[in-house]
Amino acid sequence: MRVIMSGGGTGGHIYPAIAIADEIKKRDKDAEILFVGAEKGLEKKIVPESGYDIELITVEGIDRKNLLKNVKVFHDLRKGSGKAKKIIEEFRPDVVIGTGGYASAPVVRMAQRMKIPTYIHEQNAFPGITNKMLENHVNKVFLGFEEGSRYFKQVEKHVVSGNPVRENFARQDKAEARKQLGFKARDFVLLAFGGSQGAGRINKAMMKVIETFNGVKGFQICLATGNFYYDAILDELADRGIELGDNVKIMEYIHNMDQYLAASDLVISRSGALTVAEVTVCGKPAIFIPSPLVTGDHQYHNARAVSEKGGAMVIEEKNLENEKLVSTILSLKNNPEILKDMSKKSLQCAPVDAAGIICDAIDDDLEIQ
């Protein structure tokens, strides 16, 4: 089978596509898979590192603040659509699967026009406008959250799959991960991050957490700031006269997130769909701080899907107080039974074989055709 995967921009679109591709290769080692992404997206680095070929097209999102810039956006879209057509003609895929991001729409739409079976995966509980527009043109819509179905129209196309997570997340062992990362068995490990791009407000809140627990024996803090914020965070710590103890790790980006999640006792993060899936697959209690700057407030809906079942707490950014965050962390640390219960309920929210469900549905479709 020959498959084009298209999705990118952020890790939330890229990693589900990789998980689906991995499942396809597991079922058919001779399958040929080509990714198509945007020239400015993270996929141009992440996809090759995962062992897959990628072609890049010129495309970017609509600028709602500066409408004049959209002249170039639409010019690039036409150019990108033309290249997408050429890629599809040359690769001759049996199936095209879009997982969101700027490149996904022109690739999926072009494939549909060329009568190739097409599918999309919507990661969030509140879908983006692009996938809602593509619904009319695809064979099936795979949903990361059942709640997302209400925002689409063609229910007969919907398959609730959950969000695909790479297998290594479920396979990680906590004790082994701690050994590899240099943490002790009895350490309390706090992991904080803001998604692949970082989150300024989470970083700011973590300054107080670091200041409070810096140098505290048995309390490990791991913070991924995002590339944009990394130098500024280190400068701010220096300005505050904080000399980091051995128990604090500050990183731009975590490439081995599976290990860090496995090793952690509590997670503080945004609630993008992939983050929620990875956290729950690892069965980790979380304090989700949804980004307020996303379409339809979808991160809030993602977080609530877990918090309503008891696997996480949700603090909206407008209610985020640094001192309160510190006290909440301390309260959870001092109540291991609560953390244990949250862990159990978090795992119950995890997607079960999402990539398998997606591949099964596509296989069934192809057999019928």
Image (spheres, helix red, strand yellow):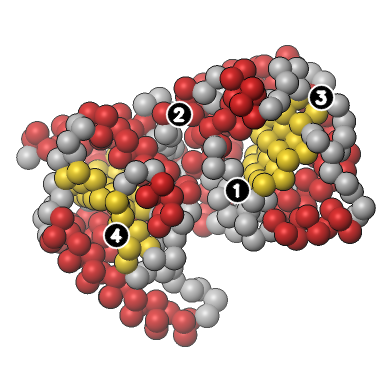
Q: Which residue is rendered at x = 81% and y = 24% of the image?
A: 218
Disc on the earlier residue, 3 or 2: 2
Q: Residue 246, relative to residue 320: is it above or below?
A: above
Q: On the picture, is 225 further left or further right than 280?
A: right
Q: Looking at the figure, which quarter contains the N terminus? A: top left
Indicate the secondary structure of the residue bearing disc 1.
Answer: loop
Residue linked to disc 2: 168
Q: Amino acid at mark 2?
A: Asn
Distance, label 2 to label 1, CA atoms, is: 18 Å
Q: Residues within 10 Å of mark 2 (few under 14, many from 20)?
A: few
Q: Are marks 2 and 1 in contact (CB under 8 Å)?
A: no
Residue 336, image quadrant: top right
Dot 4 or dot 1, earlier in sequence? 4
Does dot 4 land on a helix, a strand or a loop? strand
Pointers 1 and 3 in contact (C-beta within 8 Å)? no
Q: Residue at (45%, 29%) from the top-left corner? A: 168
In the image, 282: left or right of 104? right
Spatial separation of the CA atoms under disc 4 and disc 3:
47 Å
Q: Which residue is mark 1?
A: 253
Q: Give the label on residue 339, or none.
A: none
Label of residue 218 in the image: 3
